[in-house]
Image: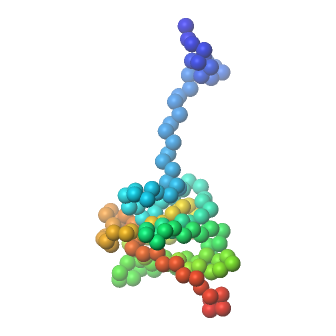
Amino acid sequence: MAGLDEILKRGPNGAVPKPEAAPEPDDSELPALNAPYQAHARASAKPVYTLHCLLGAEGCRSFGYVQLDSNSIFRAEKEGQIIVLRFVGSKIWEITINGLNLWKLYDGIHRHVIPWVRKSDRGFAAGADGEAIISGIQIKEIDREAS
């Protein structure tokens, strides 16, 4: 005879429901400080509100996607690729991301599905199998009169 717990777990037709699938890993949370290097979070399934810039020993700076300006830049140069973003609020902030294999990151930022980017504190080496590597993240305030 089935126990009460087993009976309560059954659906209206008496069938035992399938166990729930394990949840997908949530890459939107900031990585642990001692986590292995990863240039950026995987794209979230839904839009996120903030882009966190993990700067290693320099800490973390965060910017609201709602303030991302529409005139961003992606370009390739001899030493790698560059993404230039501007966030416009009470102040204008320009973020320059340098590295390799950044095209998917650029797209994900503009779809507002990348919760964080992370500068490598280690040496700059070519990414294996197209893996993104961020060699630098520079953040500077832009004078409204000059822009």
Residue at the (62%, 92%) spot, across then down: 146
Residue 95's spot in the image, x, y percent? 53, 77
Residue 103 visible in the snapshot: no
Q: Quadrant of residue 135?
A: bottom left
Residue 59 visible in the snapshot: yes
Return the residue nearer the eye: 91 or 70. Answer: 91
Question: Seen from this angle, which residue lies furthest right?
Answer: 90
Residue at the (65%, 87%) spot, across then down: 144
Location of residue 72 with respect to 22 vertically, above or below: below
Question: Seen from this angle, which residue lies furthest bottom?
Answer: 146
Question: What is the count of numbered marks?
Answer: 0
Location of residue 63 with respect to 6 vertically, above or below: below
Location of residue 43 with respect to 16 vertically, above or below: below
Q: Quadrant of residue 64?
A: bottom right
Residue 11's spot in the image, x, y percent? 62, 23
- Residue 25 as seen in the image, left or right of residue 7: left
Q: Quadrant of residue 89?
A: bottom right
Residue at the (43%, 69%) spot, across then down: 57
Residue 124's spot in the image, x, y percent? 33, 72
Residue at the (33%, 69%) spot, across then down: 122
- Residue 142 as seen in the image, left or right of residue 123: right
Residue 100's spot in the image, x, y percent? 38, 72
| Quadrant (top left/top right/bottom left/bottom right) for the N terminus | top right
| Quadrant (top left/top right/bottom left/bottom right) for the C terminus | bottom right
Return the residue nearer the eye: 120 or 96. Answer: 120
Give the colour scheme shown. rainbow
